[in-house]
Amino acid sequence: MQTIENTQFKAQIDERGAQLTHLVNIAGDFDYIWNNDLWPKHAPVLFPAIGRSQEDAYQFNGKTYEMPQHGFVSEETFAVEENSGSKLILSLTDNPTTRKYYPFHFKLTITFELSEQGLSFNFKVDNLDDKQLSFSFGSHPAFNVPINGEGQFSDYQLEFSPNNLDLQQFEIVKTPAPFRDGKIIPISAANKSSIPLNYDMFADGLVIVENDGISGVRLTSPKTQHSIELSLTDFRYVCLWTKEGADAPFLCIEPFQGLPDISGQQSELLTKEANVGLDAGKSRSFKYQISLK
């Protein structure tokens, strides 16, 4: 386990999966990140797939490859390249295990850095192969709601920026795992750029917001002075999830660059909708900031 801290915040990151496990407000002595066996994860990294793949597999060059839900990096141990006290750099390079699922040479580097505002993430994918690769990428942080125990889940709302967005989502079908059906529909609970939280909105398992131009989202409530804000300019989509049917006191706010499969349609990797293509020898970076109060 790696620790970084400054005068405002303390973060712990597990080398296994490069998963943020704690993000503590030092003055308030509370944790923003979920820790409970009701859902035993905290902030998984999703690579090179997001969500479920049809039949837990995909096609590449006429072959079928297995692909676990959200990819495989959550089971891999990252190398520590640097820990300077407030900044941590972890990396994962392909190995025989990853190549069983994903036949490419790559390097995934993740930088965590604390500031006075909160925690920033930088994710860099390097294509070390002699051929094009394709991937989806996502971050899956689970935040305690209510924040610091102040109020209840239904007292909170999500405020998207800029203002006056017509928020839309991908329609989800459960098979029983949640897949897309290919349709995009309005978010019925939304009031322009704001979504009041309630558990019924997660009956289908998740909400994937589709709206080009979203720059950020803020979790807030009149019951507390605290808030959590994520910048989203490097990510095309954002997913919202809590454990359905459990009235669980957490909310995942997940920047996505990529999408789960459409039900009944197994994907060809290089042409999969919303995937990122990366030519041989090239790299691609994604970053976002969690700003905290």
Image (cartoon, grey):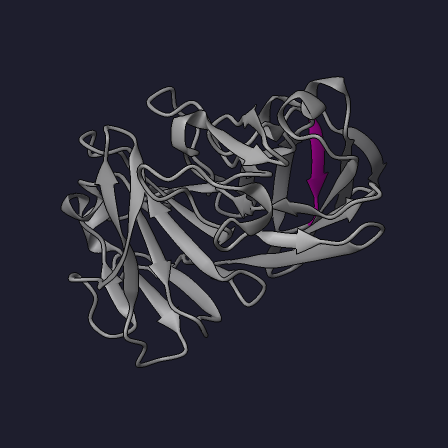
Residue 233 higher or lower than 272, as above or below: below
Q: Position of residue 214 (x, y in %)?
A: 44, 70
Q: Position of residue 173 (x, y in %)?
A: 22, 41
Between 42 and 66, the one lying in front of the other is 66
Residue found 18% across the figure and 31% down from its top? 245
Residue found 81% across the figure and 54% down from its top? 282
Q: Is residue 83 visible?
A: yes
Q: Is residue 281 left or right of residue 114?
A: right
Residue 142 higher or lower than 71, as above or below: below
Residue 144: name its quadrant: top left
Q: Residue furthest bottom?
A: 164
Q: Is residue 36 left or right of residue 45?
A: left
Q: Please say whether residue 221 is one of the residues in the magenta stretch.
A: no
Residue 57 higher or lower than 128, as above or below: above
Would you say the magenta stretch is mainly helix, strand or loop? strand
Q: Please say whether residue 4 is one of the residues in the magenta stretch.
A: yes
Residue found 29% across the figure and 30% down from its top? 177
Q: Position of residue 202 (x, y in %)?
A: 22, 43
The magenta stretch is 1-6
| Quadrant of the rendering where the N terminus is positioned | top right
Residue found 67% across the figure and 50% down from its top? 7
